[in-house]
Amino acid sequence: MPFRSRTRSRLRSHGRSGDRKKLSPGAIRVAGAALLLLLSMLIIAGCGTSSSPTVLDPKGPIAAKEAGLFWLILIIASVVFVLVAGFLLYSIIRYRARPDSPAPRQVGGNFGLEITWTIVPSVVLLIVLVATITTMFQLTQPNDPGTITVRAIGHQWWWEFQYPDLNIVTADEMHIPAGHVAHIDLVSDNVIHSFWVPALGGKTDVIPGHNNAMWLKGDNPGGPYRGECAEFCGTQHAHMDFAVMVDSPADFATWASNQQSGPVAPTPGQIAAGEQVYAHGKCITCHVINGVDKLTNPIGPNLTHFGSRLLIAGAVLSNTPENLRSWIYDAQAIKNGSDMPSFTDMSSDDLDALVAYLGSLK
Ligand code: CUA
């Protein structure tokens, strides 16, 4: 009789003849804890909101291929996990030590088993490797005459988007035309960030002194899709988001031509007063509004079409007059450590005028 069947029959007969005990309190506690963990995972999985970025609802070809790879590997890993953990649990419970158990027979190796558990994982890993490499090749940037180029610049802690071919500079919000490749040059002059739009594709590091590039494509007009910095870059790393709009080509052209135009002329009254506050205050030491000031290397976002943006302050706040007012008044309370100072000494009238002016810059 070969070793395995002999052992099994002996153990089985032992199990039958021996006083089979109920599970110990310890085993019940472990099983209870495992069940609780599983339940809490299910509950936490329900916490996502519709605005949460997710890789499981792909909106472009890169994200779709990556999600396909994710599901394939998840299924393979789950089957392996269930088999291994199930076999382990079965062995632990079925062959646990009992009073009067004889010492198990000590054996050396088993040639057949060892060959099997070398070959089976190798085949599984080979499948994963082939699928991964195939996906990597499929993700090389395709030729598209309609490709647009964007320079995404990681600052601490917000994203600037420059369109060198279109002469556009914006912040917190990236527009790309649906159905076309957006080639993205990733630039940082400070620390390492990581550029990630989960709905559209995987992340790429943004490294000072080493300009990475990636590409994205949205299949259909949609968004805003939340983008995030995915590399710890300082205390406000978690507040370094941005929004991506996938516009129809016509909407993109409209957006681009609006962004290329000069700032809206201020209407007399509060808005004109706000322009004076901007142009004669401290704002122009860090910001640019095309035609109003000409700072060459601004620390802060270009504000020429500030009013057209959905989000401000590194996408931490939606662009409402109330939020903008709080941001200018005490940015440090909202985003401690950012380059934007608080202006708690600004008069209420100046603050209101500045908010009205910036909001008018559509
Ligand atoms: Cu930038 Cu994290």
Image (cartoon, rainbow, N blue to C red):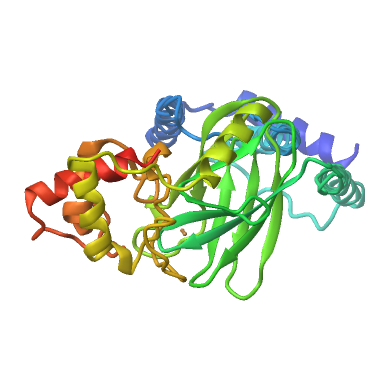
Q: How many marks?
A: 0
- Tell me the quarter of the picture where residue 1 sits: top right
Residue 211 percent across, percent down from the top left: 66, 67
Residue at 51% over, 35% down: 53
Residue at 23% over, 42% down: 271
Residue at 68% over, 48% down: 104
**In front here: 143 or 128?**
143
Q: Is 129 left, or right, of 191 in this rendering? A: right
Farthest residue, direction front: 268
Q: Is residue 94 visible?
A: no
Q: Is 130 left, or right, of 105 in this rendering? A: right
- Would you place residue 156 above or below residue 65 in this image? below
**In front here: 167 or 270?**
270
Residue at 60% over, 35% down: 199
Farthest residue, direction bottom: 209
**In front here: 315 or 14?**
315
Residue 81 percent across, percent down from the top left: 67, 37
Residue 258 percent across, percent down from the top left: 52, 39
- Tell me the quarter of the picture where residue 72 sits: top right
Residue 326 percent across, percent down from the top left: 18, 46
Considering the image in quadrants, where does the C terminus appear? top left
Q: Is 182 left, or right, of 334 in this rendering? A: right
Q: Is residue 50 visible?
A: yes
**In front here: 285 or 189?**
285
- Would you place residue 304 above or below residue 307 in this image? below
